[in-house]
Image (cartoon, rainbow, N blue to C red):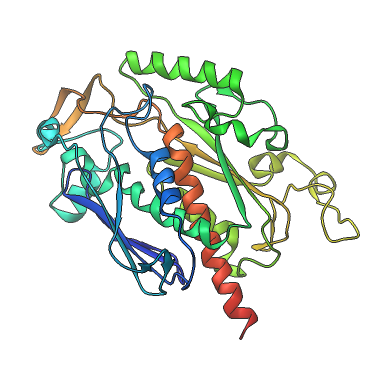
């Protein structure tokens, strides 16, 4: 079922939205890495539900319990096992989904593929799975502390920051519940999400991620290009519909003479439309990309749904859901980026020592 990500730094996860717990095993973490457990928990707190009025009100402490691989504050080089127990399950909220398939959900495809699905909150397809990724990402960040990863909400619906990341103050990202570093725009986004929530509807948005201090040489040619693996990781996030890095789709409107990043004498480039990656390998410039999230598929409105016996009926959405996922997805984007970068960092060390 594709429950693992990474080659040398590898995370394998388990769990469902309304099961007893979620968790994972991290293989390939180097030994003697000092782990700040408070930092790991703080990253989980950034992702957890119930943190503001514009996210799902499911109450979970999301407290991680490490079972192995960390001794006296340092990694041992063995598998790191961890769990996060579910505390606030309301499985009865989803009894109405037992015999129906919601539009734009994985209900139908899972049922057709496996013939048996956990319909409680989406089961394994729920974005609650991402809690595991944030744990691994928090470990990964501590392996490569010199690399700085900052993600932020750059748009919600039609509301968008109209300035490049170079003009953004990353210190303001956590100053508001939307995690938008433009305080004025953040207030507009928050008001809009609040209105969408009152209407029982949902809205999508875009997260921009900037990775700085990346050494030259991370990434492998052909099928293990750095940007390809970043794209795969981001497109694995629930509700993600698009990924672009560097100049992205705007590059298609340029001529080569406009798009080429000309060199400085020290090997840096005058512009960075390549997004810090050339030939699939990091060139030392900032890596930046955007991740597009669709509106959450669960609406607290009446919609037509398909039943197990092939009928179309009207059904009211229930349960606790985010009206917009992007504020809580910021730490998820950072976590996956960190995992990809650690994986390539370890691969690079193997290559250079070969």
Which residue lies at the image location 68% right of the left edge and 39% below the top edge?
Answer: 250
Examine the rendering and report whether any part of residue 55 can be seen: yes
- For the residue pair 274 and 14, the one nearer the viewer reads as 14
Examine the rendering and report whether any part of residue 2 can be seen: no
How far across and how far down the image is residue 210, in percent? 62, 45
Which residue lies at the image location 39% right of the left edge and 44% below the top edge?
Answer: 44
Quarter of the image with the C terminus in it: bottom right
Left or right side of 268 for 219: left
Q: Residue furthest front?
A: 72
Residue 160 in the image: above or below residue 31: above
Left or right side of 169 for 9: left
Quarter of image, res 308:
top left
Left or right side of 214 for 342: left
Residue 285 in the image: above or below residue 325: below
Which residue lies at the image location 37% right of the left edge and 74% below the top edge?
Answer: 78
How far across and how far down the image is residue 77, in percent? 42, 74
- For the residue pair 260 and 313, the one nearer the viewer reads as 260
How far across and how far down the image is residue 24, in percent? 30, 60
Q: How many marks?
A: 0
Quarter of image, res 263:
bottom right
Residue 353 in the image: above or below residue 164: below
């Amino acid at each position: 079922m594709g429950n693992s990500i990474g080659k040398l730094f590898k995370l394998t996860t388990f769990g469902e939205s309304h099961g007893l717990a979620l968790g994972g095993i991290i293989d390939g973490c180097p030994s003697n890495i000092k782990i700040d457990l408070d930092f790991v928990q703080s990253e989980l707190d950034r992702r957890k539900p119930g943190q503001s009025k514009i996210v799902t009100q499911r109450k979970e402490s999301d407290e991680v319990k490490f079972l192995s691989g960390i001794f006296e504050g340092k990694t041992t080089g063995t598998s790191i096992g961890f769990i996060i127990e579910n505390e606030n399950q309301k499985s009865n909220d989803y009894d109405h989904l037992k015999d129906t398939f919601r539009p734009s959900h994985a209900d139908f495809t899972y049922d057709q593929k496996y013939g048996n699905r956990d319909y409680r909150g989406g089961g394994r397809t729920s974005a609650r799975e991402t809690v595991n990724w944030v744990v691994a990402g928090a470990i990964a960040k501590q392996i490569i502390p010199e690399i700085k990863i900052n993600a932020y909400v750059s748009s919600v619906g039609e509301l968008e920051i109209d300035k490049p990341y170079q003009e953004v103050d990353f210190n303001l990202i956590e100053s508001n519940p939307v995690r938008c570093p433009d305080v004025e725009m953040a207030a507009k986004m928050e008001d809009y999400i609040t209105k969408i929530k009152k209407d029982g509807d949902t809205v999508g948005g875009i997260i921009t991620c900037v990775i700085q201090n990346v050494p030259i040489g991370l990434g492998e040619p052909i099928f293990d290009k750095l940007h390809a693996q970043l794209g795969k990781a981001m497109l694995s996030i629930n509700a993600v519909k698009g990924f672009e890095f560097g100049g992205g789709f705007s590059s298609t409107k340029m001529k080569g003479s406009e798009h080429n990043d000309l060199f400085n004498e020290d090997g840096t480039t005058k512009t960075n439309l390549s997004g810090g990656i050339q030939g699939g390998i990091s060139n030392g410039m900032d890596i930046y990309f955007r991740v597009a999230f669709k509106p959450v598929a669960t609406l607290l409105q009446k919609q037509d749904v398909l039943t197990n016996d092939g009928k179309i009926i009207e059904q009211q959405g229930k349960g606790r859901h985010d009206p917009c996922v992007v504020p809580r997805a910021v730490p998820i984007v950072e976590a996956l980026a960190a995992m990809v970068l650690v994986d390539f960092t370890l691969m690079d060390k193997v290559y250079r020592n070969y």
